[in-house]
Image (spheres, rainbow, N blue to C red):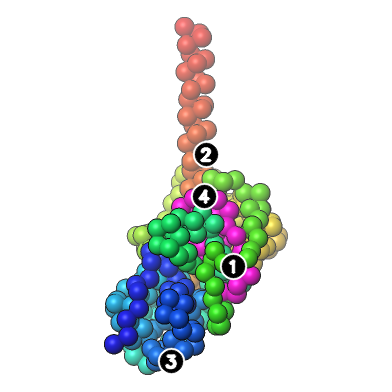
Amino acid sequence: MFNLSRPFCDELVGSALHRSAWQLGLSYKRLMKVLSSTYGLTPSVGITQDKALAKAFGMDLEELIQYHTLLPFTVTFLNDIEKDQILRDFLKPYNKPMHAFSIVKKTIKTMTWLHFCPMCNIENLQRYGVAYWRRAHQLPGVLVCDIHGTLLYKSEVSIYEKGSLPPPDKASGCLVSGFGLSAQILQSIASTSVSVLNNELLIKKWPEHYSYFVITSAYCFKNPAMSRRVISVDLQSFYGEDYLQTLGLFFPLNQLHKWPTKMLLSSKKSFSPLKHILMIVFLKTKMCQLRIDVEERSLTARREISKIK
């Protein structure tokens, strides 16, 4: 039995493999031959269905998938039937779950390069003696570190790299753009994305959830259709054209069927995790602003009353 050191917290499976190869003095290709792990693996993207590989890490396959691949992020918002089917297919030995691979690739299609946080590198070097690639930094739309709140760096290492994968502290890169979004919004996108990755969101009926907040709380139009039309305009203004263009989610305002509007309607259609995250962050921020406005109006009213007295 060939044993590898366990992946670190939130480490991509591909990062753990390349780190193990370096520690053992082997090439990555040689290590994979020793492990006989040549199928069902796209290391940098972070997907594997290889039970032998999980065993080499001292883990079972479900644990490896849950904590060291991007698959949990991609299936969170699927209906239960489709989600269970994907996971069952993934756990079947020697099965080729092409649907799962295509979903993951579609989910991260805007992520061409691996991202890293220099502060995470420093802390991990001090704690473990090595830096590693974190899953949380490779999620679409995430521009800041969920731990430190600082802008990430975009490396020159492809997320689909199949050759040598250097540790993030050895990779060159440049600071990502924040697209003029506030630190609060960027941090909210990152923390919500990590909650999705860790399967911490328990809501099942998302259209009804969104509609409740939009129609009864955030927008008080008597006509629900009006609320749905207005939210599309507001959401686009909230994030800005440049950010949405980068993610492939920008839409013309005169477009008849906009994706934010569709998300408020009951449908069997599944929306990407990124769309859900942007909707959640937008509504959460909108509700927070409404509470602040109400509190400020209440405070102003009390002050006026006290002046009269």
Q: Amino acid at mark 3?
A: Lys
Looking at the image, tell me whether mark 3 or mark 1 is earlier in sequence order. Answer: 3
Q: Are marks 2 and 3 in contact (CB under 8 Å)?
A: no
Q: Position of residue 297 (x, y in %)?
A: 52, 26
Relative to residue 265, is residue 235 depicted above or below? Answer: above
Callout 1: SS = loop
Q: Going 57% across and 46% down the picture, which residue do you hit? A: 183
Q: Using residue 159 as the reference point, say whether residue 251 is left or right of it.
A: right
Relative to residue 295, is residue 127 depicted above or below? Answer: below
Q: Are marks 4 and 3 in contact (CB under 8 Å)?
A: no
Q: To which residue does mark 2 refer?
A: 289
Looking at the image, tell me whether mark 4 or mark 2 is earlier in sequence order. Answer: 4
Q: In this orientation, does residue 16 appear?
A: yes
Q: Residues within 10 Å of mark 2 (few under 14, many from 20)?
A: few
Q: To which residue does mark 4 refer?
A: 149
Q: Position of residue 120 (x, y in %)?
A: 48, 57
Q: Going 69% across and 56% down the picture, which residue do you hit? A: 241
Looking at the image, tell me whether mark 4 or mark 3 is earlier in sequence order. Answer: 3
Q: To which residue does mark 1 refer?
A: 171
Q: To which residue does mark 3 refer?
A: 33
Inspect the magenta stretch and tell me whether residue 155 lies in it: yes
Q: Residues within 10 Å of mark 3 (few under 14, many from 20)?
A: few
